[in-house]
């Protein structure tokens, strides 16, 4: 079978377990012929991510905590040595302290604000500083993950909503900076999906219920739908698209 991504190499950052959106994306990219490289945050997660990576034969696996410059530099070094060119980068990483994801946004601490911005926003820029050369070799597609809490006030999303707004703005600035090198930068704004990160958001179940009732397609987002959109963004089918935020939320974002 001819795949849309035959011969492409994709780096996927942000697999924590088999519920991670990054894992759904990885499977969809691999189904279309992409070769995969995974990163995991630290030793704590290595075994779990290794077991998943082994399900996709030929995958490579490297550690990378995006808050550590030495990890990012080491990632660049090992990819420069082992990968001729990189075609796809999936950034599916975010973090906020649990205590910042309930109550009032106005109570956000200085430290909580900084951590959310550093891990959820700056990390994309920090990674691209190192990997833009590899992505520019044959042209590349960068995909990050965002949520509608950037555009509208969603209860309890608080500091992460502000971080996602900054991430979406970063997507536009990065698209302009890297466009001349043939690198496209886009985000998928996914509807809520039950993952490890979502556990931190208070009243997540009631959000899922409302979406099932109100989204135009009357259902919640299946991670495989996000994976298929990532395939589109990774492939030359989307070659005219950069700096874009694509909603994959069964239409919920259009509702008043
Ligand atoms: P996961 O918890 O499965 O994925 C989040 C990933 O971020 C984990 O792999 C986590 O690793 C990683 N991460 C956090 N801090 C660091 C760090 N310092 N260095 C490297 N990796 C780090 O949840 P999701 O799949 O839900 O989240 C993926 C992305 O999708 C996030 O950007 C999220 O905001 C976004 N998103 C999620 C939605 C949802 O409803 N689930 C909806 C829309 C967007 P670790 O576990 O080790 O911390």
Image: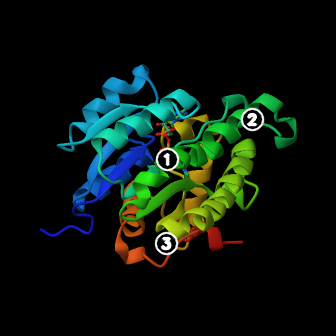
Q: Position of residue 233 (x, y in %)?
A: 42, 67
Q: Residues within 10 Å of mark 2 (few under 14, many from 20)?
A: some
Q: Earlier in the sequence, mark 2 or mark 1?
A: 1
Q: Is residue 156 visible?
A: no
Q: Give the residue pinned by disc 3.
A: 217
* Residue at disc 1, secondary structure: loop
Label 1 C-beta lies within 8 Å of the nearest ligand 1 atom: yes
Q: Is residue 134 left or right of residue 246?
A: left
Q: CA distance from mark 2 to mark 3?
A: 37 Å
Q: Nearer the viewer, residue 242 or 17?
A: 242
Answer whether labels 2 and 1 touch (C-beta < 8 Å): no
Alpha carbon of mark 1 to alpha carbon of mark 3: how far?
25 Å
Left/right of residue 90 with respect to residue 189 in the rendered view: left
Circle 3 residues within 10 Å: few <14, some 14–19, many ≥20: some
Question: Where does residue 42 sit, x and y in percent of width and height?
Answer: 44, 24
Query: In this figure, which residue is indicated by the disc labeled 2?
Result: 114
Residue wearing tag 1:
92
């Amino acid at each position: 079978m001819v795949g849309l991504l035959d011969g492409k190499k994709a780096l996927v950052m942000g697999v924590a377990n088999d519920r991670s959106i990054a894992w759904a994306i990885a499977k969809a990219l691999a189904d279309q012929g992409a070769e995969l490289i995974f990163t995991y945050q630290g030793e704590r997660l290595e075994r779990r991510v290794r077991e998943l990576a082994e399900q996709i034969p030929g995958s490579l696996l490297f550690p990378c905590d995006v808050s550590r410059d030495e990890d990012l530099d080491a990632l660049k070094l090992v990819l420069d040595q082992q990968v001729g060119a990189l075609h796809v980068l999936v950034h599916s990483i975010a973090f906020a302290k649990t205590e910042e994801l309930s109550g009032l946004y106005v109570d956000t601490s200085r430290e909580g604000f900084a951590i959310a911005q550093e891990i959820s926003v700056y990390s994309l820029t920090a990674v691209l500083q190192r990997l833009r050369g590899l992505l520019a070799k044959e042209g590349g597609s960068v995909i990050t993950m965002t949520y509608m809490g950037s555009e509208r006030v969603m209860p309890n999303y608080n500091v992460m909503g502000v971080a996602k707004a900054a991430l979406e703005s970063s997507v536009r600035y990065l698209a302009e900076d890297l466009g001349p090198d043939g690198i496209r930068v886009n985000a998928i704004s996914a509807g809520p999906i039950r993952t490890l990160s979502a556990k931190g958001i208070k009243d997540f179940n009631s959000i899922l219920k409302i979406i099932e009732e109100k989204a135009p397609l009357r259902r919640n987002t299946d991670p495989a739908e996000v994976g298929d959109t990532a395939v589109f963004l990774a492939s030359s089918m989307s070659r005219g698209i950069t700096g874009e935020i694509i909603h994959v939320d069964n239409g919920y974002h259009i509702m008043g």
